[in-house]
């Protein structure tokens, strides 16, 4: 959608809900696809996501009261709460917790809130692993900053959004999604060191290749409980490694040789979880290298290896996603294909030669539907820019 159409769209929704008067501001924040580096962020490791054209738009205005009113256009629901009491978790309209969480974290930072009306809308498919939640948090914090005028640097805002999700929503996610949604840049993917938060915007020079996202239609509902379980397993593995090698402060510091040396002390599941994380960090670094040489073929192979490791060692894939990946790899001109995001459904990301596009879509559409009964959504995606105030 063109920018001005999007702005008019959300402003109209806002005006219909809360009236026309006064100055309405609009923020936007994108979803993301992760190209490689999965389940490494909360192990202090490396990730390589890019922001998508899919986005959340948030329109807002102060309302001279001590009440916050929020309208979700996608759910067609409104919530309202007073700032005179502590902001509570909402068991029913759970979508509102992402905004509530951000406002709570701002209060904890000492930001004085005021009454405001907020309307938002998004086109990031929900439950698809493309980070609609992070985009909503980031769009909210960017809107709040403009409306309230506080000074907090972007990396701090990113961490604040992550805290909102960890502490208020209760999903123990890492920092990747919020980071790319805030810091992404058009035409670039972002290499992030999740320990130091040093990052590099890398021009995505794909020549005749394209990045394609396939949505499995399987909502990743298990993601909260299984995700938190994976984190615990990583911590168990880290505890063993750190006992023998005190320099290891996170799985990012561990090498395969060290893991192998201690294999007999590991429960096999925890061993495999650690193996995934250690090898995935190596793959991210190797694929950055490949990209800098313009070697997309190797990049694709690292994507494939990443998927296989997520499927076999980290066990966060599912039959539908494995099918999408298998079908993709059957098409000549596909350089690599893997699951992206938290897992248990959601989307795959594939790197393919542009000339293979038509065959790719046809092959996937036909065979995926025959086996699963689900029509897959297929998107070609370019790297979009990160969050901003757009009106
Ligand atoms: C989810 C989390 C991220 C990251 C990925 C897996 O998207 O929100 O922090 O851990 O899963 O790479």
Image (cartoon, helix red, strand yellow):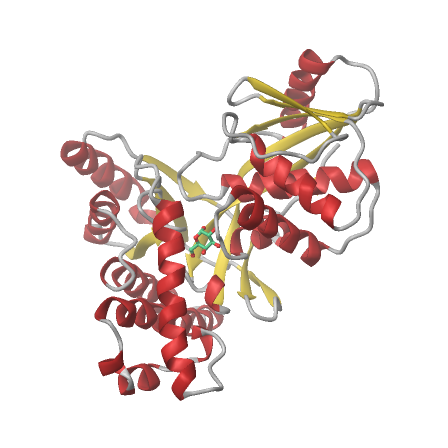
Q: Quick check: 333 above or below 381? A: below
List x then y, in percent, for residue 152.
Answer: 77, 53
The answer to whether 265 appears left or right of 230 in the picture is left
- The residue drawn where x is 41% and y is 50% is 211
Q: Looking at the image, which is closer to me, 36 or 355? A: 36
Answer with the quarter of the image where residue 351 lies.
Answer: bottom left
The answer to whether 327 appears left or right of 105 in the picture is left
The answer to whether 21 appears left or right of 133 in the picture is right
Answer with the quarter of the image where residue 141 lies.
Answer: top right
Q: State which quarter of the image contains the N terminus.
A: top right
- The residue drawn where x is 22% and y is 82% is 264
- The residue drawn where x is 31% and y is 66% is 273
List x then y, in percent, for residue 87.
Answer: 67, 34
Q: Quick check: 357 above or below 90? A: below
Kindly tell me whether residue 349 is visible in this rendering: no
Q: Looking at the image, which is closer to me, 249 or 291? A: 249
Residue furthest out toward the left: 371
List x then y, in percent, for residue 76.
Answer: 54, 17
- The residue drawn where x is 41% and y is 44% is 129
Q: State which quarter of the image contains the C terminus.
A: top right
Kindly tell me whether residue 261 is visible in this rendering: yes
List x then y, in percent, for residue 122.
Answer: 54, 30
């Amino acid at each position: 959608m063109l920018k001005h159409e999007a702005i008019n769209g959300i402003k109209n929704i806002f005006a219909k809900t809360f009236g026309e008067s006064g100055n309405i501001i609009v923020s936007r924040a994108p979803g993301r696809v992760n190209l490689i580096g999965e389940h490494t962020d909360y192990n202090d490791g490396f990730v390589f996501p890019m922001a998508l054209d899919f986005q959340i738009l948030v329109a807002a205005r102060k309302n001279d009261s001590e009440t916050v009113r929020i309208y979700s256009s996608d759910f067609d629901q409104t919530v309202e709460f007073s700032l005179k009491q502590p902001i509570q978790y909402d068991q029913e309209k759970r979508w509102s917790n992402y905004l509530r969480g951000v406002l709570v974290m701002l209060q904890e930072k000492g930001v004085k809130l005021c009454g405001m009306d907020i309307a938002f809308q998004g086109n990031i498919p929900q439950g698809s692993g493309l980070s609609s939640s992070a985009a909503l948090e980031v769009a909210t914090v960017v809107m709040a900053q403009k409306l309230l005028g506080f000074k907090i640097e972007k990396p701090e805002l990113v961490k604040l959004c992550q805290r909102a999700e960890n502490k208020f929503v209760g999903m123990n996610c890492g920092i990747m999604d919020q980071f790319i949604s805030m810091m992404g840049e058009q035409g670039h993917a972002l290499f992030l060191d999740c320990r130091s938060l040093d990052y590099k915007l890398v021009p995505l020079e794909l020549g005749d290749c394209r990045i394609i996202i396939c949505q499995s239609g399987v909502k990743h509902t298990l993601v909260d409980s299984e995700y938190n379980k994976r984190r615990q397993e990583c911590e168990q593995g880290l505890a063993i490694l750190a006992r023998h090698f005190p320099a290891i402060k996170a799985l990012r510091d561990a090498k395969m040789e060290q893991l192998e040396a201690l294999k007999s002390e590991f429960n096999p599941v925890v061993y495999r979880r650690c193996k995934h994380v250690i090898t995935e960090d190596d793959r991210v670094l190797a694929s950055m290298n490949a990209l800098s040489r313009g070697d997309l073929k190797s990049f694709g192979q690292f994507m494939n290896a990443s998927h296989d490791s997520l499927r076999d060692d980290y066990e966060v894939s599912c039959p539908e996603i494995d099918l999408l990946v298998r079908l993709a790899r059957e098409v000549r001109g596909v350089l690599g294909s893997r699951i992206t995001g938290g897992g248990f459904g959601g989307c795959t990301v594939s790197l393919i030669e542009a000339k293979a596009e038509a065959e790719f879509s046809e092959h996937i559409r036909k065979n995926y539907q025959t086996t699963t009964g689900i029509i897959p959504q297929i998107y070609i995606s370019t790297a979009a820019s990160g969050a901003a105030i757009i009106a």
